[in-house]
Image (tube, rainbow, N blue to C red):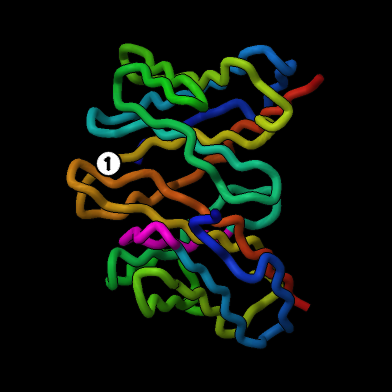
Amino acid sequence: DAKTTQPPSMDCAEGRAANLPCNHSTISGNEYVYWYRQIHSQGPQYIIHGLKNNETNEMASLIITEDRKSSTLILPHATLRDTAVYYCIVRVRRSGTASKLTFGTGTRLQVTL
Amino acid sequence: DAMVIQNPRYQVTQFGKPVTLSCSQTLNHNVMYWYQQKSSQAPKLLFHYYDKDFNNEADTPDNFQSRRPNTSFCFLDIRSPGLGDAAMYLCATSRDLRGGNQPQHFGDGTRLSIL
């Protein structure tokens, strides 16, 4: 699975959009980009994933560049409850195998008043 | 309405005394995983069950074992815990569907302390 690079930490004011970048310059054509987050003292939580098109769900939007070498997770209106470590993971999505996750160091997002 | 349940949330054991952590799921997912997360580090996969098939990661110590008696339950056994095994242990599940495996659902973990 391709390696990802994320900034170690970011701050965001409550109510503003949080834009979390991720570089995955060695991504292969069949690898998806997944985002999970981990709030303190909880297990990781799935947020969103995509292959090459931009994706949006009730939690966030995922913007993937045309060359797929980087992506941005957008939390449109961050709240204090969004304070967490955000992990960007790249992996193949293949039926018949487990969806093993290799976590990097992630980005610690601090949302402030 | 927790879907992946880990008990207990906190476990204390003595150095060298075997300990078992448990995980249950109400999602009927066919794949179950165990991750180890040490303080200030990212989770690291230990092993997983794909249905009844056990799959160990290459660097998982022999001290760690797992059992899955049925679809709903999975256990992590640590035969002789050392001080370095103090960590949060996370259980996760996923369903493998045609077209690709679905995202994982995690429990809130068991924090293991070694005296």
Tell me how many marks there are. 1
Is residue A63 left or right of B81 when viewed as pictured?
left
Give x and y (percent) for residue B54: 32, 71
> Which residue corresponds to mark 1?
A93
Pinpoint residue A96: horizontal percent, then vertical percent: 20, 54
Amino acid type of disc 1? Arg
Q: Quadrant of residue B9?
A: bottom right
Q: Residue at x 68, y 69 (%)?
A: B112
Q: Residues within 10 Å of mark 1 (few under 14, many from 20)?
A: many
- In depth, the one of B79 and B8 nearer the eye is B8
Q: Nearer the viewer, residue B40 or B5?
A: B5
Q: What residue range appears in magenta? A: B26-36
List the single residue furthest toward the right.
Answer: A113
Q: Is residue A26 left or right of residue A113?
A: left
Query: Residue at 57% across / 79% down in the picture?
Result: B20
Q: Residue at x 67, y 28 (%)?
A: A109
Mark 1 residue element: loop
In x, y percent, where is residue A78? 65, 21
Q: Is residue A25 left or right of residue B101?
A: right
